[in-house]
Amino acid sequence: MTSTPPRPAIAATGLRKSFGDQVVLDGIDLHVPRGTVFSLLGANGAGKTTTVRILSTLSSADAGDVRVAGHDLAREPDAVRAAIGVTGQFSAVDNLLTGAENLQLMANLHHLDRGAGRRRAAQLLDRFDLTEAAGKPAATYSGGMRRRLDLAMTLVGNPQVIFLDEPTTGLDPRSRRTMWQIIRDLVAGGVTIFLTTQYLEEADELADRIAVLDRGRVVAEGTAEELKRRIPGGHVRLRFADPGGLDAAMSVLGRAVRDNDALALRVPSDGSLRSLRDLIGRLDDRAIEVDELSVHTPDLDDVFLALTDQKVTVR
C-alpha cells in the first residue's frame, strides 16, 4: 500500500496578473512543500510583492489555480486567511502602543479571550526576547526589536504558512542574523516560510528551494547549489608542492589553466560530487600528489545577474 504524499503548503499553476497593458505575472507555477523555506528572488519590479499579495488574499489574480494550506484561494479566501500570517516590508506595529498592547490587540482580532490573549502575548514576548521592553511604547524600539515584534504579532494566530516580504530590510547584520535564527526555529516547528528578499546571502543561508522571477516568469528553480551549478565559472583549484607534480597533473587534465608562480592549476568544474570524484580518481590513478584542493562555484549574485533582466519598473 503506497502512502499519499503530503499536500504542499502552496501550489500555484498558471498564475497571471496584469495592470493595464503591463504583464506582471505571466503564468507562473509554484510548489512549496510544508515545513520548508521557499525564497522568491527577482529584481525590483519582477513581480515578487505582487505574488505575495495574491497568495495572501490581498490582491486577486487574473488567472490561475492556487491552493494555500490546502484551501482554494478563490473559493475559500477566509480559510486561507485563517491559516496564514503576513509580515510585509514595512512594520505593522502601532508606535503609540506598548509591545504587550500590540500583541493583545492582535489577540483580540483573533477572538482570543482575555486570559488566553495575555498568555499568548507573554509567550511571544518571551520567545522574541521582548519581555523587558513589553511595557514600553513601540516607538522606542530599535529596528531589530520592531521587526521581532512585527513577526510576533503575525504568530498570535499560530499560522501554518508565513509570508515574509523582505523581512530584514534595513536591519544591521546582528539583527538580521537574529531574524534568521527565528525563521529557522519556526520551520523546525513545522511552519512554512515564503520569503522574498533583496539579500542573496539570506536566500542562500535560509532557503530549501529558490525560484528566480524575471519579467513575470520563473526562469529557474532549485536548491541554491543546483542554481549555482547552472552558471559557468565553477572550477577546482589544485596546488602542488613542486613543479614536477604540476607538470604531471597538467598532462593528465589537459583543459586546466596553469599558474606557474603559485604551482597551481584551475580546472573547470560544476562543483558536483561526481565531477570532483572523477577529477581525484584521474590524479590518483597516476599517483599524482595534490598539496591543496579547493572548490570554487559561482554564488547567488552570479546566478541572479545571469538569469534576470533588471530593466523592469512595475512591482
Image: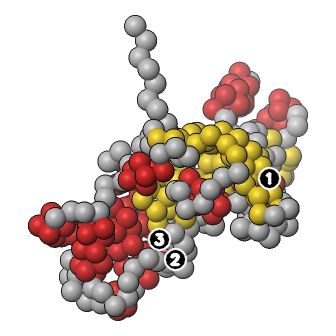
Report the residue marked by disc 3. 176
Residue 21, above or below 147? above
Q: How many marks?
A: 3
Q: Earlier in the sequence, mark 3 or mark 2?
A: 2
Report the residue marked by disc 1. 307
Q: Looking at the picture, how far across and down is residue 278, in whole percent?
A: 71, 26
- Rendered-image quadrant of the C terminus: bottom right
Point out the residue furthest to the top here.
Answer: 1
Calculate the distance from the C-alpha at mark 2 to the C-alpha at mark 1. Answer: 28 Å
Residue 212, above or below 135? above
Mark 3: amino acid:
Arg
Depth check: 54 or 286 in front? 54
Depth check: 304 or 44 in front? 44
| Residue at screen point 21% across, 86% down | 135
Report the residue marked by disc 2. 90
Q: Determine whether the residue tagged by mark 1 lies in a helix, strand or loop.
A: helix
Q: Looking at the picture, how far across and down is residue 57, in whole percent?
A: 53, 56
Calculate the distance from the C-alpha at mark 1 to the C-alpha at mark 3. Answer: 26 Å
